[in-house]
Amino acid sequence: MNAVRALLLVVAVAATFISAQTNDTRPPIKIGFMVPLSGGNAQNGRDILNGFLMYLDEIGYRAGGRQIELIVEDDEAIPAVGLTKARKLVERDEVHVMAGALLSSTGYALAPYITSMKIPMVYPVVSADDLTQRRRSEWIVRTGWSGSQPNHAFGEYAYQKLGIRSVVTIALDYAFGWESVGGFERTFAAAGGRIRQKLWVPLSAHDFAPYLAQIPRDVDAVYALLLGRTALQFMRQYEEFGLKGRVTLIGGGTTTDEHVLPFMGDEAIGTVTALHYSAALDTPANKAFAATYRARFKKIPSYYSESMYTGGKWLIAAINAIDGRVEDRAALVEALRRVRPSDLPRGPMELDAYGNPIENVYIRRVERVNGELQNTVIDTFPRVSQFWTFDPDRYLSEPLYER
Amino acid sequence: MAEPRATAPDWRLVVAGLGAVFLLAAPPFLSAYWVGLLTQVVILGILAMSLDLLIGYTGLPSLGHAGFFGVAAYGVGILSTTYQAGVVASIAGGFIAGTGLAALLGLIVSHVRDVYFLMITMALGMVLWGLSFRWIPVTGGDNGIAGIPRLETLIGLPATGPIPFYYLALVVFAACIVLMMVLVKSPFGLTLQGIREHEPRMRSLGFNTWLHGYLSYVCAGAFASVAGIMWAYYNGFVSPTYLDLTASSELFLMVTLGGPATLVGPVIGAGAIVILKNVMSAYTARWLLILGIVYIVTILWAPQGLWNLGRHRRS
């Protein structure tokens, strides 16, 4: 008996040794990654990268029995630069898989190239609806969200739970703004609500006075979709105009996202927004994520930070599922669509047949807890699809949300 | 000025010759990525040379030149995707859009000089950018227009890919540089340089300086349109960033870095910026800092641009 056990042990050790050897002889898996690291969007890009670095550190830069080599490029938030960098990553560095991009314009510009080169790519943030709808690519998997997705849920919530009947919207005047407001309007109007007025703000706006002055005081709520500097400026002026406390402020998730929230004051308190993530989400997975992130990067994780932590986890799960055989790109993209890692900071998530997540949408209210502003989750819509409750085929036959 | 000299050929001829040989012979030995970068260099080289006609030869500093480049690119993008037009119609449409616009805007800007010219061209450039960004039904707004088919296939080249497209761009580049060299050496070009040096004197000699300035603006717009058409086909998409202020000012830097009134200088400037940006950014996120240092060093040691190094401006 002992002899058999000893033999088994020897075989087991030898097997481990051999497998370790064969694993190590395989060259590293090359992941190409790009986000804006210079210019006005650099902070958001940095957050996305941080999340990815954090996850890669957790797994020791190993997946599927192979070493991982990460190649980071700065796409400057300019689509043509993004394309040049994608060419560099694919043609010079010969990466096996790509991830990244922040802006929709970059996302759209890369898509034809990604498809023609048959390189699997993960879009952690780019939220343009059509990337997983009317103009989807089989090589692109989105682990983020589509712009109208949380807003479909939020439109209904605003009418039914918040008791809002009439709304004025203030949103950034580009595709992200139109799709968010469009999604909100659709379900809000279907429930019986009325959009009184839609105000569109250029991305370069510095002063919201001309817009705030147009808001009728008898409206139930103002829906704001802004981000970065515009969100900060808007919040301040909303209070200065005496609107805070008189007209409820609601909005898209980026308006109070943690990339701007720490720079806001009491004027932000009470704002209700919807997004698929909140740094204050009370789950063990998110608490661990947020604590580690804070300890390492000295700031609260934003939804951008979470995006590529989860995106990275998704990608690594896919690589593990095919035992690191990333040279088989078709198998990798198939695995990306099939895997379903659990314990994500944002909660449960799966991909639909179109490559977009089905995930929880959280209704969050800004509160001050322990002296710090946070997006407290006050309600959850579980498993929200990009098509909400509509039939996908019919949804896709209708036009994309526009102004 | 690239004037023939009786003395022994200076370093410029040697560099230009080596550069030409490199552009012609090197690509088959380079990776697809480097061929792509060289393609960018020659296309942006055409664009930088076209701006040099204005800045260097006519003395009109334009900060809205990327506008024509972008409008021509949009012409190609819109015609070849939304209207499914053929390649000839798309190229002609892009060229007419860019050049026609230059002819139109030229009527406005050709009455002013110096800093006023700079301000007005900058404003018009911003208007064009705004149009591309906000005229959504036509331009697709911020998302731009993707899905422009490949030029090599359209014109029936036997092979597709980076190298055939590169040589196509190189042929266009060669044609443009020859045309522009002929232009600046012609009596018309000499008149432009005369206007740059002393406009009242040219006027008193009987030259219609307004018409010359206007025509040089239109010519520059036409060459910029050619570059825009190639750029649209190279990238396969168009977006508002092609014609924003950053694009125009980067273009301005290419000309001033390389050396105005030399034609070759701006190509070198374009090459330096494209290569520096792409090579540096692969190694450091602080590449903007390095680019800034390069500009400062150039201003200090070669204020007339790299190609005018060691050459004194004639007074």
Image (cartoon, rainbow, N blue to C red):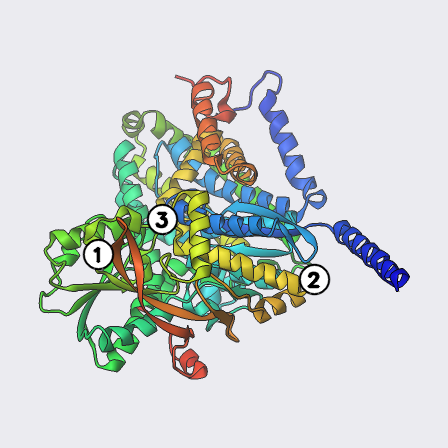
Label 2 SS: loop
Residue shown at the point (46%, 39%) measured from the top left:
B48
Residue A312: image quadrant is bottom right
Q: Position of residue A151 (x, y in %)?
A: 32, 70
Front residue of A216/A381: it is A381
Residue B132: image quadrant is bottom left
Label 1 SS: loop
Q: Callout 1 environment at 10 Å: few (<14), some (14 to 19), or many (20+)?
A: some
Q: Position of residue A180 (x, y in %)?
A: 32, 67
What amino acid type is highlighted by mark number 2? Asp
State the quadrant of the C terminus of chain B: top left
| Residue B72 appears in the picture as rendered | no
Q: CA distance from mark 3 to mark 1?
A: 52 Å
Q: CA distance from mark 3 to mark 2?
A: 58 Å
Q: Callout 2 environment at 10 Å: few (<14), some (14 to 19), or many (20+)?
A: some
Front residue of A165/B97: it is A165
What residue did someone put label 2 on?
Answer: A323
Say whether disc 1 or disc 2 marks the residue closer to the N-terminus. Answer: 1
Do dots 1 and 2 share one subunit?
A: yes
Q: Write down the chain letter for disc 3.
A: B
Q: Write down the chain letter for disc 1.
A: A
What amino acid type is highlighted by mark number 3? Ala
Residues at circles 3 and 1 in contact by the CB criterion of under 8 Å: no
What residue did someone put label 3 on?
Answer: B102
What residue did someone put label 1 on?
Answer: A269
Where is A152 relative to A30, above or below? below
Residue shown at the point (33%, 55%) measured from the top left:
A257
Q: Nearer the viewer, mark 3 or mark 2?
A: 2
